[in-house]
Amino acid sequence: MAHFRWVTAGESHGPGLTVVIDGVPAGMPLSEGQIREQLARRQRGYGRGGRMKIETDYAQIRGGLRQGRTIGSPIALWIENRDYSTGGGPDKRPWTETMSLEAVEPPPTRVTRVRPGHADLAASLKYGYDDVRDSLERASARESAARVAAGAVARVFCEELGCEFYSHVVQIGEAASCADAEIDWGAVEASPVRCADAASGEAMVEAIDAAKRDGDTLGGVVEARVTGVPFGLGSHVQWDRKLSGRIGQALLSMNAFKGVEIGDGFAGAAARGAGFHDVVLPQDAWAERPWRRRSNHAGGIEGGISNGEEIVVRVVVKPIATLAHPLPSADLDTGERVEAHYERSDVCVVPAAGVIVEAMLALVLADALLEKFGGDRLSETRDNMRRFLETVYPRSAP
């Protein structure tokens, strides 16, 4: 059974991030420019911090590609951290010393003030760290750049099979979008907060400004949609093969993502079944694809299997845990009351979160597509999918 696998390595202020992607079929067009486009989208958005002014993320392809096409071997990517060679930490020492692979003298200043809401305390206790930096460097959202790079490769594969990815901001703080069901995706990309409604976007910007003045942070909600997803991805037969479960696990693995719903998931708590479930339309109402629905409350997945409708996912992003006005906390060494550690941070990452959600969805869907249709080369995968889709019409159809 074919699988799309990936792994990342690297720390926030280390030399850079490494990504290895295995399972990409041969013959797929790919360029560094396609990956750079997604990395650039991740770096934009109102409320980002000073790090985005330093980094210009560019993933170098160091394996798995020849003459502009994949060759079936693992794809290796390298994203340099410019801050490593040009900047310094809170103790004013250069990152090349603080994050040196070899021991330096004198040792870097230890971080012992843990931040509520971050991995600092839990990871330090689990792994026995006496310096919180050992955890905060890997637990940093900087790792999302590696995910977006991997997701960009997966996205190309999914797009070659007909999928298209979109996302927009639904809410930041108490400011919620009033966008219509039909969204102008060009307007979303032009918005500083990636909001489809201009007036709501202005309210979101004001909310971010207010939080920044208070030395605070803001979270929100993003929605992602994927069109062109074929029938039959995932399975109902085992818990770990359900597409909905795989999407949920992937998204909740991301820093600051604290809630996921597929379709109108939470709205179903107050609805009756007759008005919530998606009526299957008769054949004379179908357009290009069979088995269309009157609505899409299920978000394109039923029984853990894609049903041919648009996949719709919403994610709750909590406020960033690093505050300019730190919360009360305790010292890792002494347990005494201190203010939490502060390191340069964003005020709001919600506009960028949609790009990360798109990437994670692409990674899950690429794996599900390969699992279902297989193929060592792209043309084989495409042919397998076409043959399968020819079988999903009504049983009596010619």
Image (tube, rainbow, N blue to C red):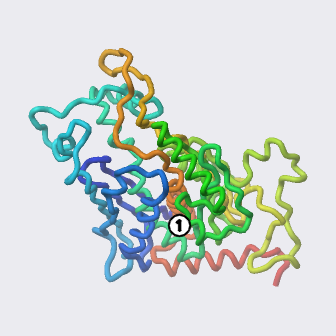
Left or right: 335 as drawn, with respect to 235:
left
* Up/down of 2 relative to 131, above or below: below
**Which of 2 and 174 lies nearest the eye of the viewer?**
174
Left or right: 53 as drawn, with respect to 28:
left
* Up/down of 324 relative to 237, above or below: above
Q: Residue furthest right?
A: 274
* Up/down of 29 relative to 196, above or below: below
Residue plotted at (35% across, 60% down):
20
Q: Position of residue 92 (x, y in %)?
A: 20, 40
Q: Position of residue 393 (x, y in %)?
A: 78, 75
Residue plotted at (50% across, 45% down):
253
**Which of 301 and 22 lies nearest the eye of the viewer?**
301
Left or right: 255 as drawn, with respect to 268:
left
Corner quadrant of residue 159: bottom right
Label 1: how many Cα within 10 Å (few below 14, some 14–19, many 20+)? many
Name the residue type under label 1: Leu
Residue plotted at (80% across, 70% down):
292
Q: Name the residue tied to disc 1.
A: 370
Quadrant placement of the C terminus: bottom right
Residue plotted at (72% across, 64% down):
307
Q: Tell me, yes or no, if residue 356 can be seen here.
A: yes
Give the structural element (helix, strand or loop) at label 1: helix
